[in-house]
């Protein structure tokens, strides 16, 4: 089936006046995350103040380091790159009604897959880089497909399977990096360095991986709203029964969405390996997949919005060390701010405050990923 | 709720949202407990100590340490009269009761003596090693201490990039000596040997065990192999079990340390060597809960005197196979300040920690024999079988 009428994709709103519903949802989609972030910063500011540091100065240090120099900007972009991709991975799942908590595991297998493809071959860069990225994506997709197949054909909750597959992925990549793929002649659990032809370069101060992530985000912004397959994802996410009735292969769509989600997470791992770490080492990728959940919820499952959400997280993470260096505030304050943000976005607290009348009908996240 | 206006799709989303929030909370909880060593350590500590300890916990973090008439801040470290020492922790907190903490204590001791300003950065992501070191270098710090084996390569790279800065790599073995970099290393096998010798003399069941961080990190394996060799030297009939954690999260898994220790106690071992950051600490705390702790069952800690760092382990803690990290770091920071930083590897002192609460449980003749062995290890007359033991 094909979709030409944009109104058809704007699902989930039963307001008699669709235009008004759209405006409301758009206002919410922007206001809720922004207010949530500000609230989190306010509470974080109180914590900083309790440690005897002026919060405004602390935040100035945090952002000045991250955004005030070309090295800082480079680092923010480096930190944000895998986060955009894991955020997109979770987003694609959410839009299809799947909660992919396994982005971390998919990222790990993607990262080690790309490392293997990166060091094991000697190819021209123009072939080697795409090959290593695609190989990492395939690894991530294959890993997610286990959960996808179980969900689609055996109705096993993907929340459970992806969480458990994270643990399996950790053990798997540890095994691979400590035995068959281990760099010889040194004691650390890690793979050899990738070939220079597989390394993602920087263009000026912009990492190529970051540009790739931006393009993928824009692509999925288009894909999810303007293509038949994107429409299938959304429809299955909104209402599988209706999707089935409309002739959409629900199981196939779920399986495919999970594979795409895994491929995106695997791409995050691949780009991290090829652009930043240069090899796979288990501790290098900690938390990137889990940050993807924060980012997808903060972006309210809007692919384009994962970019600013990831940049925010990347900026905070990048500035944390300088915050401690300059003020003595422990870097974990950044995690507190992010956790609070997620809490405010996910729980309908802020949307109730802001949109009291409408909140009864449209809670925060639920209206967010049906909209534009 | 205005149910009539809701489509079925929105019901689906509601449920998904609820599941999402719960799942996200789960993930965040598990994330923070596995990613942050301090948090994993704090959990058993908090549940153990309950109410009575909350009052005596010093709440503030000492980040800056100052002595009178000395360098008061790092605004002008380049000036010849000012001396600044920076420390970059490995992932984990500066109060990790292990390497980070000991290295920081040693740094502070030295800084007090030379009137230096000292400060630390806590690393949260291993990809930030280089950047965290660079923060100090950019401020013209005179000496930078980096903590932990895993930061070795980043430290070597930084030493090459900043030839005018003295670098001290705690627990970092140096292959090719670099003039401005000293690696503080230890003969872990000697400390392990002394602890194992004591265990071999003390065991009643002729079975001793261990819960160790990963054997892919050589110092941990040296501890384990030294422990085994020492125990067999003291008591040829003893059965020594060496169990290592898998490499991932090897030093941040107290639950594994506790379970592994419990299992070996159940299998008849009466002394367990628990070595490996939070993983080992979990084992110590578990063994301390055993009814026989301090009488029939003992635990042995590692790296620093764990009587002070893990007070909950006190009932069972026989001793700790100790790298004298504090004095080793102190010595190197002082040497750097005097311009006599030894390039390459610097072997810090090793030994075993005082017996503390188990003092009375250890017979005097055992104590005397252990002292002899410690002396033999120091003068080199005792061969621990290492580093050749790394190939075992």
Image: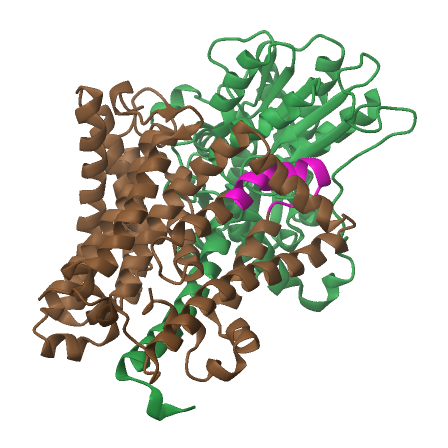
Chain colours: A brown, B green
At horizontal 79% and vertical 50% (from top left) the residue drawn is A52
Q: Position of residue A372 (x, y in %)?
A: 33, 64
Q: Quadrant of residue B72?
A: top right
Left or right for B161, reference A109: right
Left or right for A226, reference B276: left
**Is A345 or B103 nearer to us in this picture?**
A345
Residue occupying the far right of the picture: B69
Q: Is residue B261 above or below residue A321?
A: below
Left or right for B78, reference A270: right
Q: Is residue B259 above or below residue A137?
A: below
* Main SS, magenta residues: helix
Residue A258 in view here:
yes
At horizontal 76% and vertical 56% (from top left) the residue drawn is A50
Q: Position of residue A117 (x, y in %)?
A: 20, 30
Q: Position of residue A96 (x, y in %)?
A: 24, 65
Give the magenta part as a residue range.
Answer: A315-331
Question: Is A322 included in the stretch rendered in magenta?
Answer: yes
């Amino acid at each position: 089936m094909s979709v030409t009428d944009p109104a058809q994709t704007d699902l989930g709103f039963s307001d008699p006046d669709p235009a008004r519903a759209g405006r409301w949802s758009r206002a919410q989609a922007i206001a809720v995350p922004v207010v949530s972030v500000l609230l989190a910063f306010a509470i974080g500011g109180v914590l900083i103040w309790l440690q005897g540091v002026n919060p405004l100065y602390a935040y100035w240090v945090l952002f000045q380091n991250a955004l005030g120099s070309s090295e800082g900007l480079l680092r923010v972009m480096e930190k944000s790159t895998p986060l955009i991709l894991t955020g997109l991975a979770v987003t694609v799942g959410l839009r299809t009604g799947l909660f992919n908590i396994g982005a971390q595991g998919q990222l790990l297998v993607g990262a080690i897959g790309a490392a293997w493809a990166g060091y094991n071959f000697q190819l021209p860069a123009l072939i080697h880089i795409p090959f290593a990225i695609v190989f990492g994506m395939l690894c991530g997709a294959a890993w997610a497909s286990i959960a996808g197949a179980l969900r689609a054909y055996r109705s096993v909750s993907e929340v459970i399977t992806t969480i458990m597959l994270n643990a399996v992925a950790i053990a798997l990549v540890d095994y691979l990096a400590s035995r068959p793929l281990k760099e010889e002649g040194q004691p650390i659990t890690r793979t050899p360095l990738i070939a220079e032809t597989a390394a993602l370069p920087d263009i000026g101060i912009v990492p190529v991986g970051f540009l790739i992530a931006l393009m993928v985000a824009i692509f999925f912004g288009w894909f999810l709203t303007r293509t038949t397959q994107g429409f299938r994802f959304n429809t299955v996410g909104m209402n599988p029964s209706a999707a089935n009735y409309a002739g959409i292969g629900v199981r196939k769509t779920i399986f495919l969405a999970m594979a795409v989600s895994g491929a995106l997470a695997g791409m995050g791992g691949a780009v991290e390996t090829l652009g930043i770490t240069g090899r796979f080492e288990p501790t290098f990728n900690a938390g990137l997949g889990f940050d993807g959940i924060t980012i997808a919820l903060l972006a309210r499952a809007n692919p384009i919005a994962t970019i600013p959400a990831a940049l925010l997280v990347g900026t905070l993470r990048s500035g944390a060390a300088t915050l401690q260096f300059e003020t003595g505030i422990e870097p974990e304050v950044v995690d507190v701010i992010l956790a609070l943000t997620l809490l405010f976005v996910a729980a309908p607290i802020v949307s109730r405050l802001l949109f009291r009348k409408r909140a009864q009908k449209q809670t925060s996240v639920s209206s967010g990923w049906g909209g534009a | 709720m205005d149910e009539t206006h809701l489509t079925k799709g929105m019901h689906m989303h509601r449920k998904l949202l609820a599941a999402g929030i719960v799942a996200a909370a789960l993930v965040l909880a598990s994330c923070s407990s596995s990613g942050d060593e301090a948090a994993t350590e704090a959990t058993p500590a908090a549940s153990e100590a309950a109410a009575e300890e909350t009052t005596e916990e010093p709440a503030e973090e000492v980040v800056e340490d100052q002595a009178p008439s000395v360098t008061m801040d790092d605004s002008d470290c380049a000036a010849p009269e000012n001396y600044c020492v920076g420390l970059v922790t490995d992932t984990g907190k500066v109060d990790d009761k292990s390497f980070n903490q000991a290295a920081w204590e040693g740094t502070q001791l030295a800084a007090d003596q030379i009137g230096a300003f000292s400060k630390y950065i806590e690393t949260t992501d291993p990809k930030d090693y280089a950047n965290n070191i660079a923060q100090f270098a950019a401020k013209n710090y005179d000496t930078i201490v980096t903590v932990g084996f895993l930061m070795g390569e980043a430290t070597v790279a930084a030493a090459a990039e900043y030839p005018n800065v003295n670098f001290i790599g705690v627990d970092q073995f140096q292959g090719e000596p670099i003039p401005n970099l000293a690696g503080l290393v230890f003969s872990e096998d000697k400390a392990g040997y002394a602890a194992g010798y004591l265990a071999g003399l003390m065991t009643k069941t002729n079975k001793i065990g261990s819960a160790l961080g990963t054997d892919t990190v050589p110092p941990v394996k040296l501890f384990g192999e030294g422990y085994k060799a020492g125990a067999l030297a003291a008591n040829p009939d003893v059965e020594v079990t060496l169990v290592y954690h898998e490499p991932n999260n090897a030093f941040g898994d107290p639950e594994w340390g506790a379970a592994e220790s419990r299992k070996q106690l159940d299998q008849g071992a009466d002394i367990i060597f628990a070595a490996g950051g939070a993983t080992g600490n979990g084992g110590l705390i578990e063994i301390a809960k055993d009814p026989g702790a301090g009488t029939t069952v003992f635990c042995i800690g590692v790296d620093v005197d764990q009587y002070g760092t893990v007070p909950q382990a006190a009932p069972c803690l026989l001793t700790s196979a100790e790298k004298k990290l504090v004095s080793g770091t102190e010595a190197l920071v002082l040497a750097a300040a005097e311009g006599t930083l030894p390039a390459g590897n610097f072997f810090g002192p090793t030994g075993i920690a005082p017996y503390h609460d188990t003092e009375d449980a250890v017979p005097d003749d055992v104590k005397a024999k252990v002292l002899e062995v410690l002396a033999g290890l120091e003068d080199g007359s005792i061969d621990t079988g290492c580093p050749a033991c790394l190939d075992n």
